[in-house]
Each structure stands twice: as structure tokens, then as C-alpha cells.
Amino acid sequence: MKRISILGSTGSIGVSTLDVISAHPGEFTITALAGGRNIALLKQQIERFRPRLVAVIDEVHARDLRTLLGATIPGILSGPEGYREAAAVEGTDMVVSAMVGAAGLLPTLDAIAAGRDIALANKETLVMAGGIVLNNAAQKGVTIIPVDSEHSAIFQCLQGHHREDLRRIILTASGGPFLHASAEELAEVTPAQALRHPNWVMGKKITIDSATMMNKGLEAIEASWLFDLPVSKIDVLIHPQSIIHSLVEYRDGSVIAQLGVPDMRVPIAYALSYPRRMIRNEAGLDLVNVGALTFFKPDPVRFPALRLAYAAAETGGTAPTVLNAANEVAVTAFIDEEIGFNGISQ
């Protein structure tokens, strides 16, 4: 039985991870759960999965959670130190790193220091400190399995091939909800509109990043670290159907792609069960029903965030870290209606 700790259990990835685990009784046990402010959901998760340790965002929420739980209280920690302790708790085989933004970096590093394999859904960890994270993982013999659908696709396409044979990576992007919007229409976008993604069910921050295409820029930086390629060898293609999750091209001109329905439970299941594959009973991909698959280049004028991310990657040093921090502040300001949609990239 594989022992799992989840950082970000009340977020979109965390909920989907627990859904996958629920569908495979007897294969997994939950060691620790780290949530944010949604203590009502966290209470349900605690009662269902019985973790030994729980962490929440602050002591106020920890106190409220203790009150809700009554007699069924596990160890409850709070704040950044609580998250870090949950990440490194004894008796864990794999940590699912699914916290949002920069907050996920230190807990992920602590999990690596404790020798836990990582199912990585927090791309900001590699954007901010890719060299440190991968070096520490190598020293500890830790395996990092990407959970993002694109990076999971690349990871799978590379299996059984020599890395020196790789020519380039092609990341696919849905284009988000404003794929065909004019510059004038983008200026009037509201948070409610930006949070309606056409294909994926995700958390607020990543959904806004998808709308600006900053998400794809951050994914290019993440892919650069994960697969040891300069961003000049990582291309982005708009693929509105979100069926091909990414492609790799080899030096002989052959291209291998990974296809599947747009459901985050698929790459999550792969990460949890690697190097094997789970039996899943959900409906698979029906290409006849999908029909045409289309592709085109992203527009750098209407979506400058992608260009900014590539520029930061090429500059190197602390530039990606600064980019990530600025983006997190801007996205929060947009959600709070303090700036407009175009202001995120400005």
C-alpha cells in the first residue's frame, strides 16, 4: 500500500487526487493533508481518509477545524511551518505537491530533503528554483513525476528513448476562454469571464494564468528544467480541443504525442502509480466523436505574457522568480477587481 501526503488537498488537484485514490481502495493510504481556508471540505477529507497529520493556513483556521472535528482530531498544524512539517512527515512514500504559487516551494524542498518522491503539480516550484530543486532531488535519489497534463505527456513520450535524440518539445495550449477575443474585448474582460475555462476544471489562479497564457509560459520554464532543454527548443501551439497534451520531436524527424480526454485525474493517476498504470473505468478518448484536431500559433500581441515568460527564461538568474512573483500579485489584484485583465501583463 502506497502512503501519500497531499499539499493542497482542498484545491482542484488535491480534490482530484483524492478522487483517484477513492476509486482504488486498498492501494493507497493518506498520511497527511495540507489545506488552506476551506476547512469544511478539509473536515470531510479528514473524516473520509483519516490522515495522521493535517496543516491549515493559520491558527485561526486550525482552531475552527478542531472545533468542527470534535473527537476525531488528528494532529493539526498551522502556517508555513505546519505545511513544511506535513511535507516531511514520517511514513510517507510520495508527496503530491499541489499548493498554489510560491507557497509550495519550501514544503516541496522539505519533502525532497526527507527523501519522499514528488508528484509535482506546483509549477512555480521549478520556475523559482528549478536548479536547487532538481539538484536536491538527485542528491536524495528522489523521483519527480510531473502532474501537469503537458509535462506528464512529455514525460510519457520520452520513456524508452535516448535523451540526446530529442530535438524539441511542443507544448499544446487550449488558448483559454479568450482565444478569439480582440484587444478591445480583452480590455473589458471581468474575473468571472476569465474564470470560465472552456476545457479544464482548475483552481482560480491557474485558470486566470491560462486566460493570459502566462500559464503556458511558466510551463515552458518548468519543461526546460524537467527535461534539460533551453526554452529555444520548447515551442507552444494552440490546440483548442485539448486532446493532444504535448508532443516531442526526435532528431530523425519523428514526432510522438500523448493523447487523452481533458481530465486531470488521468495524469494524477499516472503519477501515483508510476511506473505502472492504474485500471480506470471512466470513458476513454473517442476520436470519432472528437472529429478534427486543429493547431495554430499563439498571438504574442494579444497575449504578451507568453513572450514575457520566454524572455525571463532566456535572461535566467532570478528573472523567472521575479516574473512569477509579479504575476501572482497581478492575478490576485485582477481577481479582486483592482486592475483590468490587460493589466496583469503590463
Image (tube, grey):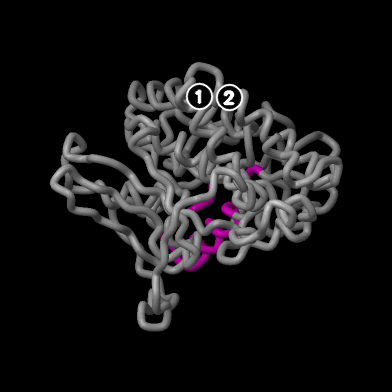
Quick one: label 1, few (<14), some, or many (20+) residues within 10 Å? some
Along the viewing direction, whichever of 38 and 200 lies nearer the viewer: 200
| Residue at mark 1 | 129
Q: Position of residue 241 (x, y in %)?
A: 47, 67
Q: Mark 2 against mark 1, which lies toward the viewer?
A: 2
Q: Position of residue 19 (x, y in %)?
A: 55, 63
Residue closer to the observer: 208 or 340: 340
Q: Is residue 2 visible?
A: no
Give the amino acid at mark 2: Thr
Q: Residues within 10 Å of mark 2 (few under 14, many from 20)?
A: many
Q: Range of the magenta residues?
A: 13-34
Q: Which residue is mark 2?
A: 321
| Alpha carbon separation for disc pair 2 and 1 | 8 Å
Of the residues under marks 2 and 1, which one precedes in the sequence?
1
> Horizontal placement of 228 versus 294: left or right?
left
Element under label 2? helix
Q: Which residue, as the protein is rendered here, is positioned at the far bottom?
A: 289
In the rendering, at what x and y percent does residue 170 appear?
36, 48
Picture coordinates of residue 273 (x, y %)? Answer: 36, 54
